[in-house]
Amino acid sequence: MTSTSATSPTATSIHTPGAVDMEVTYKKIAWRLIPFLVFLFVLAWIDRVNVGFAKLQMLQDLQFSEAIYGLGAGIFFIGYFLFEVPSNLLLEKIGARKTLARITILWGLASMAMAYVTTPASFYVLRFLLGVFEAGFFPGVVLYLTYWFPAQRRARVNGLFMTSFAIAGAVGGPIAGTIMSQMEGVGHLANWQWLFILEGIPSLIAGVFVLLYLPEKPANAKWLSVAEQQAVTQALVAENTSASKHLSFKDACSNYRVWLCAAVYFCVVSGNATIAFWTPSIIKEIGIKGNLQIGLISAIPFIAGTLAMIWNGIHSDKTGERRMHSAIATLIASVGLILTGLTLGNAVMALCALTLAAIGILAAFPVFWSIPAAFLAGTAAAGGIALINSIGNLAGFVAPYMIGALKTSTGSLSSGLYFVAALEFLASFLVVVFVKKTQA
């Protein structure tokens, strides 16, 4: 491409950020990218956590214990942990389209294969492979959004994308409940087998559309004008060359703030894994009967969490404050989980408490991810975001396993909920004490 002189009238009038309405441009980008990325993550999340609904019948059919389920649900995150950083570093080299398409297609296949689990070993292997195949999707999208939006807009944008957590919970429950209710006795498969197959197919189709729909970076977006492309690119280049930002993966690994963020995220994810994998069981334990009813009621906490997530991200961007927005959310999560454990004998109170926990857990996510993005750029952002996410997501192994093991030994979900509540409180403590106001 031929370079344009900085003194050229054309360059001044067309190619500078000042010649473009940036507010309109960023809204245009958000409307083009976010709905599709949300849809992809909804598919990923449903395929990741539908085992929580399959559990309602699968454990009886296969004679699995709660501990086997807890280990299988959590072992997903071991594969996720091992392959997340390599996947994100590869994304930076080969691009988002190829990486996200590969991830989407492979997790769809792994999810469908779950229908043919017969032994604990096959359950563990397929859950591990699902983690391997999905590894890199979430941090890949977080990284991908840094190619489009500057730091001061990311809490809101992250919040919009991360509504996919809550949307998946809100729509995933009713869909899973409907499939398990309607597909019972159809063909030679059990209802939980149909659940895995029917929810895996859309991911295969979506993987193809990734290649057709997603542009790599602003310069590849044909729906932006040349002036808009260059304005967005220049704004990000200026931000990422800031002396306060770390640009290499080695810099990220040697920065204590990355490891602090990983510890905080571990605590946050423990709550997310709990409501993802155990909400159907919690609702069943408080006395709700029927797969469809469980699915419909399980949507309530996630709907409330969606609203809290959007509001917290918008308010954090509006005020420019990250630290207390994150800490207060995880504190609310801790209180909600404790109250859920205390009120399991009362269906209404337990559901209200679980909803409070979901509000706190989900509201923490978009604001948290604005903290590492404030001091990482370039390869450091690719590797650092993946490192934080992979270490943090080990909680997705620890929390379900501990809840399953504690339920097997005590006969109640309460002790496991208290364990996760303690981790959420620890997240609040770490953020308030160790994250400086200037870093957040």
Image (spheres, grey):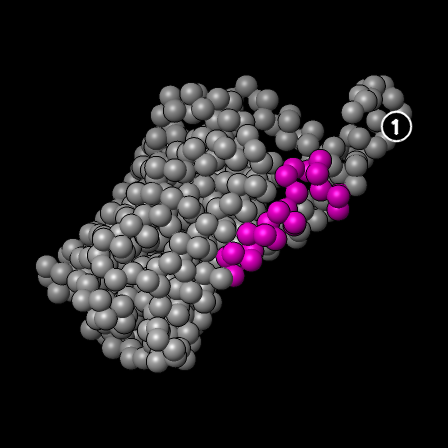
Q: Confirm whether residue 335 shows in the render.
A: no
Q: Which residue is mark 1?
A: 10
| Res 342 → quadrant | bottom left
Residue in the image at 51% along x and 22% along y? 247
Q: Nearer the viewer, residue 304 or 92?
A: 92
Residue 133: horizontal and vertical position, in percent?
Answer: 42, 46
Q: With 235 as the anchor, is 417 left or right in this view?
A: left
Dot 1, crowdedness within 10 Å: few (<14), some or many (≥20)?
A: few
Q: Residue furthest right?
A: 9
Amino acid type, callout 1: Thr
Name which residue lies at 56% across and 58% down: 205
Q: Nearer the viewer, residue 54 or 416?
A: 54
- Prevalent SS, magenta region: helix
Q: Please identify the residue farthest to the left as the structure is shown.
A: 409
Position of residue 72 measured from the top left corner of the image (x, y, whole percent): 26, 54
Q: Which of the pair 130/382 is nearer the observer?
A: 130
Q: Is residue 223 magenta?
A: yes
Examine the image and state in which quarter residue 123 appears: bottom left
Direction from residue 393 to residue 237 in the image, left or right: right
Q: Secondary structure at mark 1?
A: helix
| The stretch drawn in magenta includes residue 217 | yes
Relative vertical location of residue 427 with respect to residue 56 in this rendering, above or below = above
